Amino acid sequence: MRALVVVGLLAVLAVIFVAVAVVRDSQGGAGAAKSCPDGWPLADVTLRETKDVKINVLNATDEAGRAASVADDFRNRKFQVKKVGNAPKGVDDVAVLRFGPKGVGSAHLLRAYFLDNAELDYDAKRADDTVDVVLGSAFQQLATTTEVNQSLGDLGSPAAPTGSCPAPVKE
């Protein structure tokens, strides 16, 4: 009987300890904008769903019609394709993703569609949430759904680029 009382008392103490720890947790806003230096932009590090990602698809290769073809692939995957056209200069890489603070989470998702082989071009002064997808001469095709999911697992969570701070999470 005494053993049962002791076990019950320990259980109650454990519940109280956990409740106090949760209430006093000081990491709830860890990495949020509270400690952001003046003038640094707040980066939206929310991982977006494809239907919420706005992109411009630009062809930086010698192959005519490449942007239109890839834009159709993105539309079939439920991305919001805003503009399709040619880039002013060629790109030798697979792709370049150009984005600002509001497009960080979207660019992170897009990295997975290029299996993390796209160069990132972050512009802290860019005000919109659209990501420019500039296709380079090394581009072959977008990743499959399975490859995208595996790549997202490898990439982890979106992070604020250097010189920015994560925006507070909207609940």
Image (cartoon, rainbow, N blue to C red):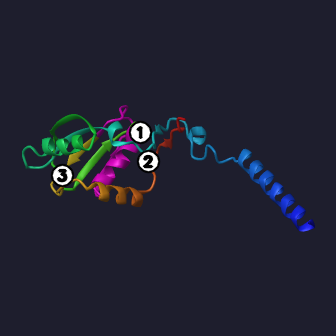
Left or right: 138, with 113 as reference point: left
Q: Secondary structure at mark 2?
A: loop
Amino acid at the residue labelled 2: Pro
Residue 128 is labelled as none
Which residue appears at 89% of the width and 68% of the height?
3
Other residues around mark 1 within 10 Å, as few (<14) / some (14–19) / many (≥20): many
* Image marks 2 and 1: residues in contact by CB distance under 8 Å: yes
Q: Position of residue 15 (x, y in %)?
A: 78, 53
Q: What is the spatial separation of the Cα atoms under label 3 and label 1, in whole angstroms?
A: 23 Å
Q: Which residue sits furthest front?
A: 1
Q: Which residue is mark 3?
A: 136
Quarter containing the C terminus: top right
Q: Which residue is mark 1?
A: 101
Q: Which residue is mark 2?
A: 161
Left or right: 18, with 54 as reference point: right
Q: Secondary structure at mark 1?
A: helix
Quadrant in which residue 8 is drawn: bottom right
**Residue extent of the magenta highlight:** 103-131
Instruction: Looking at the image, tell me whether mark 2 or mark 1 is earlier in sequence order.
Output: 1
Amino acid at the residue labelled 1: Pro
